[in-house]
Amino acid sequence: MAKTGTFSDDGRDPLLLAFLPAPPVHLSLLNAFSVQVGAQSIVLPPGCERLLALLALHGRRTRSSAAGCLWPDAAQEKALACLRTCIWRCNQAADLVSAGLRTVELAPAVHVDIGDPRTADGELLPGWDDEWLMAERERLREVHLQHLDTQIDQLVKERQFGQALELARRSLAIEPLREVTHRAVIGIHVAASDHAAAVRAYQRCRTLLLTELGVEPSRQTVRLLDGVRSTPAESTASGTVGL
């Protein structure tokens, strides 16, 4: 029988944990890393933060795989030793990590803020430049943007143009050079019969793409203005799109 004060490899005292109610644990990865245990924020060493983020994003990993991702320049023995230390430190702070002989994963009680990536509103761990994080950051961003696209389309069908424009602007704040979102803004104004605003939105899109990427808007974007009848005040502006 385990005795109080006798800790396992992952730093937990099984007897004490059996009698103490576990407070809720919330792990935040959007906009900034944080761990909230009950009403208390806890501070962890950088290696522990990265271990929790890796497990939150990629799920259960073998110990060797997790150690290789987090300490790619270290010898395997050293990397595994660092991993054991991080597991122990995480579980000294709270019940954060479930560690087996060969695998490691987040403890079941840990709730992660990304939840449904479609509704994850924020940047994933800004300022972190770990190689294993880059593809996941891009994937979550694209899933969220596509979800916004779907919402915008539905709002336009319902003629809720103000709400649609709000979501389109939120999408552009995430990815300013995404031409499909600029098309959404133009399309909203066209659907609302605000032709002057549609032309201005096109001009903003064209200027941005030329300045940042050195390319013209696609024909698909230009065609959104087909049939727009400009007022005399808009004639000069519309000349830039060949209307």
Image (cartoon, helix red, strand yellow):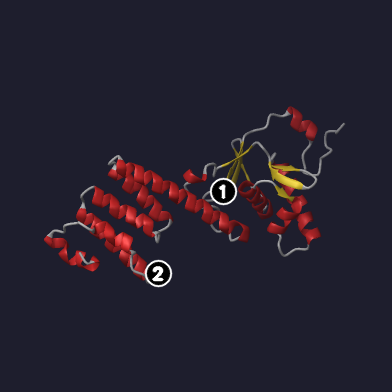
Please tell me in which quadrant of the rendered image residue 196 appears.
bottom left
The relative height of residue 159 versus residue 130 in the rendered view (above or below) is: above
Please tell me in which quadrant of the rendered image residue 172 appears.
bottom left
Task: Give the foreground label among 2 and 1.
Answer: 2
- Of the 4 image quadrants, the one containing the N terminus is top right
**Secondary element type, mark 1:** loop
Looking at the rendered structure, the kind of residue marked 1 is Leu
Q: Position of residue 225 (x, y in %)?
A: 24, 58
Side (left or right) of 16 relative to 1: left
Residue 55: assigned label: none
Residue located at (34% from left, 57% from top): 182
Residue located at (33% from left, 56% from top): 183
- Of the 4 image quadrants, the one containing the C terminus is bottom left
**Secondary element type, mark 2:** helix
* Residue position marked by numbered label 1 in the rendering: 29
Residue located at (25% from left, 56% from top): 198
> Looking at this rendering, what residue extends furthest in the right direction?
1
Q: CA distance from mark 2 to mark 1?
A: 31 Å
Q: Position of residue 178 (x, y in %)?
A: 40, 59
Residue nearer the viewer, 110 or 207: 207
Residue nearer the viewer, 48 or 132: 132
